[in-house]
Amino acid sequence: MTKRVIITGASRGIGRAIAVRLAESGFAIWLTYQSNHKAANLVKDEIEATGGACELMAFDVADYQQTQEALEQKCLAHVPDVLVYNAGIARDNLMVWMSQQEWNTVLDTNLTGFYNVTRQLLFPMIQKKKGHIIAITSVSGQVGQAGQVNYAASKAGLIGAVKSLAREVGKKNIIVNAVSPGVIETDMTEELDFNKVKPLIPLNRIGSVTDVTETVEFLCSERQTYIHGQVIGINGGLAI
């Protein structure tokens, strides 16, 4: 029986790579995105070109009503086996200059969005007595980063949410974990000067999306049954 995974924020970057990797592993993909129709369709085409299955769902995870409307009917027909909460944005600024909008927008998507999406899936997963929930956090939520008070707070909050949720639903056979990437080479980090970043990383290299996707694939596979409530760091030693 084909397993279904819903991946939020999967039209670009790490989310896109996770969608492609899980499709290659035999998952049917429910790919959510907010507004980048072109990018989302490119991912869908890539997955389907290799024989995979992909459905697109456009909604704003920060909007509870939109999220509920998008997922409620969908879950009546098919309960996803896995949720990968990857949706996330950054609005970097020093806190002394940070606007309320920059703060709220990041928290709404990165943290409240996790509640909005996961809340819709919990009852179906509990009734099914099985599920995997994986949140993509960030090394910034573990060690902090100047200019990212809003982003780091949202990702640290996500880590706390994962650990607490793991205590709530573990006995229902729902496995919850977080994956915390460091500096990963994607289209979203291409403006970084990697030569300045690498000396800060004990392994002295930038991570690849494969480092992340292989970990996510393992965490939502049948091979993994006892890692629960953990934060898996993929950062080359940036956070030790």
Image (tube, helix red, strand yellow):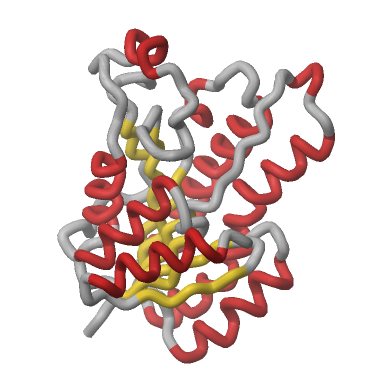
Between 185 and 170, the residue placed more toward the observer is 185
Q: Residue furthest bottom?
A: 77
Looking at the rendered structure, the number of numbered marks drawn on it comes to 0
Above or below for 154 versus 142: below
Between 107 and 98, the residue placed more toward the observer is 98
The residue drawn where x is 25% and y is 81% is 2
Can you see residue 9? yes
Above or below for 107 versus 8: above
- Residue 12: give x, y in percent of width and height: 46, 51
- Residue 117: give x, y in percent of width and height: 58, 64
The residue drawn where x is 26% and y is 20% is 205
> For the N terminus, which image quadrant?
bottom left
- Residue 84: give x, y in percent of width and height: 42, 58
- Residue 35: give x, y in percent of width and height: 62, 61
Q: Residue furthest right?
A: 100
Q: Residue furthest left?
A: 223
Can you see residue 171? no
The residue drawn where x is 47% and y is 57% is 11
Quarter of the rendering containing residue 62: bottom right
The residue drawn where x is 70% and y is 23% is 93
> For the C terminus, which image quadrant?
top left
Between 12 and 233, the residue placed more toward the observer is 12
